[in-house]
Image (tube, rainbow, N blue to C red):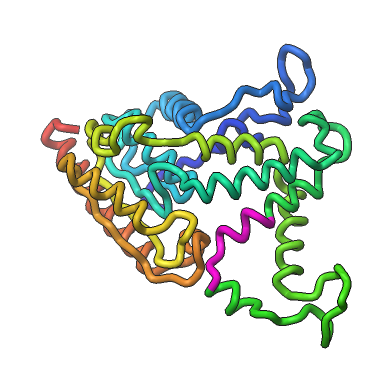
């Protein structure tokens, strides 16, 4: 009721924006691997074109968590005059080596599936097994050890003792298989390859120091991390905050205690909601004041 929220699917995602399963206008067949590799910068440029189309000159806030945080950071650097505030949540200036490694294992699982067919599976059987495994691998990185233990422990699934074969014994095994199977029904395997690669390639600094990369930023920042997030740990958020402060950019940092791992930013969180609500209200008042003074 208070703010207009604009949320577009990313290029390569295929659910609203052009992606791998869409027809290539040259061949009339689905793009598959003929689709160009997409970067975070490409995603943000497409979003800027959408904003242009809607006739919006400046955004009150660009908000994103995880890969969405990459895009929020990219907005602040690529279009500094068009962004009043940035909410960078459970994110970083680049992926860690460990995160890249997990992505590669997932991609290899997809590409090793016989049904993948070098990405030309459209109209045929999809690489269910490979994509399901990739999702299971990824899902493990979203949870904390503490939460997995609390949720599943070593509890068995519908049995009183071990099967001593390769059936599903533990509840955590059943949960991961469920997550993998559900993901196959709603996601394209090739999009998984492209999106994970875009995340791997992203590096806000791009060969410079992070201080240099953020030198031209004009937006105020709210940076949020979660104590149990080992995929995007707090020290990566603090790295962004220090670089912003070195440039004199107003930056508010909040580390929220949570046992839910990287998934924390997707779950209800009163501290996060309160921080965003207050930050937005303050930003809106500031922008209105600047507008009256002719500075915005």
Q: Does residue 207 belong to the magenta stretch?
A: no
The spot of residue 207 in percent (x, y) is 35, 30
Can you name the residue that lies furthest to the bottom here?
Answer: 160
Q: How many marks?
A: 0
- At 42% across and 36% down in the image, what residue appears? 203
Q: Is residue 27 above or below residue 272?
A: above
Q: Does residue 139 belong to the magenta stretch?
A: yes
Q: Is residue 54 visible?
A: no
What range of the chain is rendered magenta?
136-145
Q: Is residue 35 left or right of residue 159?
A: left
Q: Is residue 22 left or right of residue 37?
A: right
Q: Is residue 16 above or below residue 140?
A: above
Q: Is residue 20 left or right of residue 221?
A: right
Indicate the quadrant where residue 72 lies.
top left
The spot of residue 51 in percent (x, y) is 42, 29
Can you name the residue that lies furthest to the left here?
Answer: 293
- At 59% across and 26% down in the image, what residue appears? 37
Q: Is residue 144 visible?
A: yes
- At 86% across and 39% down in the image, what residue appears? 114
> For the stretch drawn in magenta, what is the main secondary structure?
helix
Q: Is residue 103 left or right of residue 288?
A: right
Q: Nearer the viewer, residue 1 or 273?
A: 273
Q: Nearer the viewer, residue 236 or 9?
A: 236
- Quadrant holding the C terminus: top left
Q: Nearer the viewer, residue 3 or 74?
A: 74
The spot of residue 143 in percent (x, y) is 56, 64
């Amino acid at each position: 009721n208070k703010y207009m929220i604009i949320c577009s699917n990313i290029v390569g995602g295929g659910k609203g924006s052009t992606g791998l399963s869409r027809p290539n206008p040259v061949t009339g067949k689905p793009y598959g691997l003929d689709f160009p590799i997409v970067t975070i910068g490409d995603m943000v440029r497409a979003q800027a074109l959408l904003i242009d189309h809607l006739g919006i000159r400046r955004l009150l806030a660009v908000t994103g968590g995880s890969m969405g945080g990459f895009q929020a950071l990219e907005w602040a650097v690529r279009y500094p005059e068009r962004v009043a505030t940035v909410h960078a949540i459970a994110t970083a200036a680049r992926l860690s080596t460990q995160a890249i490694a997990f992505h590669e294992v997932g991609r290899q699982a997809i590409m090793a599936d016989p049904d993948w067919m070098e990405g030309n599976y459209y109209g045929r059987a999809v690489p269910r097994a490979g994509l399901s495994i990739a999702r299971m691998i990824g899902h493990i990185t979203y949870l904390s050890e503490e939460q997995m233990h609390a949720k599943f422990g070593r509890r068995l699934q519908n049995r009183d003792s071990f099967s001593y074969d390769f059936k599903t014994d533990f509840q955590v095994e059943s949960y991961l298989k469920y997550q993998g199977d559900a993901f196959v029904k709603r996601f394209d395997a090739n999009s998984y390859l492209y999106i994970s690669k875009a995340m791997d390639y992203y590096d806000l600094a791009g060969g410079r120091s992070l201080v240099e990369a953020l030198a031209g930023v004009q937006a105020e920042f709210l940076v949020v991390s979660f104590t149990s997030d080992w995929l995007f740990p707090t020290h990566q958020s603090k790295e962004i905050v220090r670089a912003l402060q070195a440039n004199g950019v107003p930056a508010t940092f909040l580390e929220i205690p949570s046992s839910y791992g990287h998934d924390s930013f997707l779950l209800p969180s009163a501290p996060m909601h309160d921080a965003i609500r207050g930050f937005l209200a303050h930003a809106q008042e500031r922008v209105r004041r600047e507008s009256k003074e002719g500075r915005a």
